[in-house]
Amino acid sequence: MDMKGYSVDHRNKPLFAASKLTTTTTKQQQQPTTTTHTIIHSLKFSSSSSSSSSIPMLLPYSLVLLLLLVILVPSVHSNNHIATNNNTFTPFLRLKRIREHLSKINKPPLKTIQSPDGDLIDCVLSHQQPAFDHPSLKGQKPLDPPERPKGYGQNNESFFHQLWTHSGNESCPQGTIPIRRTTEKDILRSSSIRRFGRKPRPIRRDSTASGHEHAVVFVNGEEYYGAKASINVWAPAVTDQYEFSLSQIWVIGGSFDNNLNTIEAGWQVSPELYGDNYPRFFTYWTTDAYQTTGCYNLLCSGFVQTNNRIAIGAAINPRSAYNGRQFDIGIMVWKDPKHGHWWLEFGGGLLVGYWPAMLFSHLRSHANMVQFGGEIVNSRSRGYHTGTQMGSGHFAEEGFRKAAYFRNLQVVDWDNNLLPLSNIHLLADHSNCYDIREGTNHVWGTYFYYGGPGRNVRCP
């Protein structure tokens, strides 16, 4: 199935991006003191002038030695204390803060499962998950599943699994949810404890200004109550630890300013966040343009998980192979008409959980934009465009089994109906690095191929 010849529309560029935060450390220098030298000099002068006899001089010098001990010992202790402050106290304090943060997000498990990729998956009681640390959610329990949108159909088989369930016998008990355990190493890879688990900021309408590049399909201009698509899964190469490559759905409310609301879900490769290059199922949310609210996965209070079989942030397996077998995952986000919460479905009809409506301002009512596609970070750490891949790492024109795809794109309307997209726009920030081509047929509905290798002869 090789579908070619679709043009790219570069109008209506709505995307956003974020610049990396930098931190500076100022070393404090200890000023030397002359107090000890002055006292010693005074004592020597006093003792030498007190007598001309050698025998009487013994007592004053003994006294001098005694006084020297009294003076120097505190001075040496003080200098050691200063050295300790400068060299070891700050790292010790940071480690203490990291462990305090870990104690908040790593809840006591009933069971722990070792994943082949090195992850530890903790089975945590549902009512003890991080979401219920939120002041507005304290004491609550997860809600029952809502009615799915009209026109919903599980039209794809699910062949994927997560690595932590590789044996087929591993699972979390009923009444618990699986949470990927966060480690000290995870946080140490981040620029700061405060920014750990969050996307960089600020967000600007010029999406390429801060190194983020996109190849997306989007719709806007109406009220949207959800989105659905099947996303082809690959393991793109990420060439810098502080870059990522992702493929996701964005459900967006508000303007591209400080009041931006987003709900995001898909897969990503992020060495900084996870410490490896596996594609991982992830979620994200923010209600103030990534400034202080929201986070990836369950790394803060907000998203309420209800499923005991899916670990958000865990690796997806199998992945698609170039010119080989293809795998995709189903993602659907929609607003429950009864309670107003935004629910997430993953894979073959598995409800993962929901974002409570009270988290948001604009998305408390509806979204005004939906996006589907890929995003990478181009840090130019080597002085030229990154070689981080998007999708399969191949351009859209190569088609099926070679380029990555999204298929069966739909949105949810005000009456909870799943509908095909209309008035579609395409955007590729740098089409010589990553591009996109859209089409429609009876099997895949609305679909598109997208991606690219990053740095190449046309992308310096």
Image: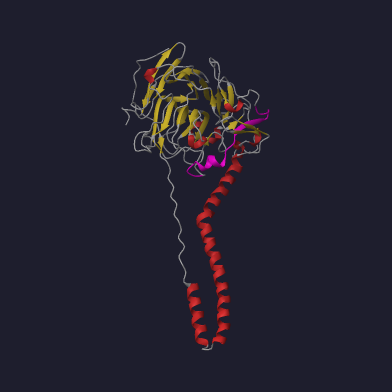
Q: Does 445 sit above or below residue 34? A: above
Q: Position of residue 383 (x, y in %)?
A: 34, 38
- Asked whether the viewer can see residue 135, the reply is no
Q: Residue extending furthest top? A: 442
Q: Residue extending furthest front? A: 54
Q: Is residue 126 left or right of residue 414?
A: right
Q: Is residue 165 left or right of residue 256?
A: right
Q: Is residue 431 left or right of residue 126?
A: left
Residue 437 vs residue 358, the one in the foreground = 437
Q: Does 135 sit above or below residue 61? A: above
User: In the rendered image, which quarter contains the N terminus?
Assistant: top left
Q: Position of residue 36 (x, y in %)?
A: 50, 72
Q: Does 107 sit above or below residue 442? A: below
Residue 215 vs residue 391, the one in the foreground = 391
Indicate the quadrant where residue 78 lies: bottom right
User: In the rendered image, which quarter contains the C terminus?
Assistant: top left
Q: Is residue 177 magenta?
A: yes
Q: Which residues are magenta?
A: 171-192
Q: Is residue 248 magenta?
A: no
Residue 450 vs residue 66, the one in the foreground = 66
Indicate the quadrant where residue 180 lies: top right
Residue name at image x 56 percent, y 35 percent: 298
Q: Position of residue 200 (x, y in %)?
A: 45, 39
